[in-house]
Image (cartoon, rainbow, N blue to C red):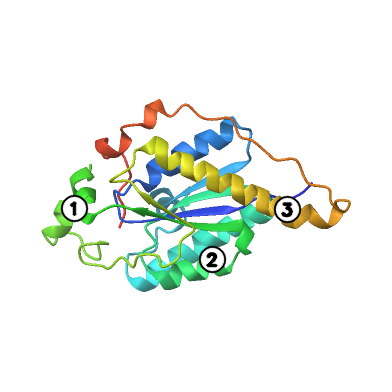
Amino acid sequence: MLNRAWLIWLTGLSGAGKSTLAEALLQHLRLCNQQVFGLDGDNFRRILCKDLGFSPEDRAENLRRASSVARLLVDGGTCVVAAFVSPYRTDRDSIRALFPSHRFAEVFVRCPLGVCEERDPKGLYLRARAGRISDFTGVSSPYEEPLNPELILDTNRNDVKFCVAKLKELAMRLSNESADTADRAALPPNQERPSRHLDPLDLDDFSSSFNRGSDKVTR
């Protein structure tokens, strides 16, 4: 069986909409019988990185573990959608280096800091501004925007349906590129592989998620 698995890595400020978009994409792919797994920054820290804080070194180790898990899953044929703040370019570049170009895509979930603070459902930005949370990305710790991501999603300007549609296009492209790389040599000359189509997901339940501030907020 051909391995058409890939990793889509969503990065952005807390409250930008990463978890909302990741969950919507995962639901769509599962409805299409795609073998897929979601890695969420909050859950990953609770399960595998309880020993880590939020210093640059600890963030790097957190992402090293997450990307290693993602690589194992992809090598086993499972597509992965990961949502992590992942604020430093060097860390994200290290993740990218683990994967062939046709199996990886970086997605910048872009949203102004002020809007992210307005969405903050847990009051973490407020606590960070008051000095009660240290090393909080966007407040007391930097976020380095991606320089050349495969996709930029402006969640302040576009709704969830639009953003997920773009993610679905990206997932389809990665699946096709992975398949092309794997089976091109096996096809007879001048024969093309049939195109694939994923049925659409009804995203009505997600259409106002950004405004409700439903994204999990991590540092």
Label 2: few (<14), some (14–19) or many (≥20) C-alpha neighbours in 10 Å: some
- Place of residue 11 in the rendered image (x, y in percent of width and height, measured from the top left): 40, 57
Q: Amino acid at mark 1?
A: Gly
Task: Residue at 47% x, 56% y: name it.
Answer: 48
Mark 3 to mark 1 CA distance (whole Å): 42 Å
- Place of residue 208 in the rendered image (x, y in percent of width and height, measured from the top left): 31, 32
Determine whether, in the image, residue 54 is placed left or right of residue 152: left
Label 3 or label 2, whichever lies nearer to me, is 3
Mark 3 to mark 2 CA distance (whole Å): 20 Å
Q: Residue furthest left?
A: 130
Instruction: Identify the mark nearer the N-term, 3 or 1.
Output: 1
Q: Are marks 1 and 2 in contact (CB under 8 Å)?
A: no
Q: Which residue is mark 2?
A: 96
Q: Amino acid at mark 3?
A: Asp
Q: Which residue is mark 3?
A: 180
Tell me where residue 144 sits by quadrant. bottom left
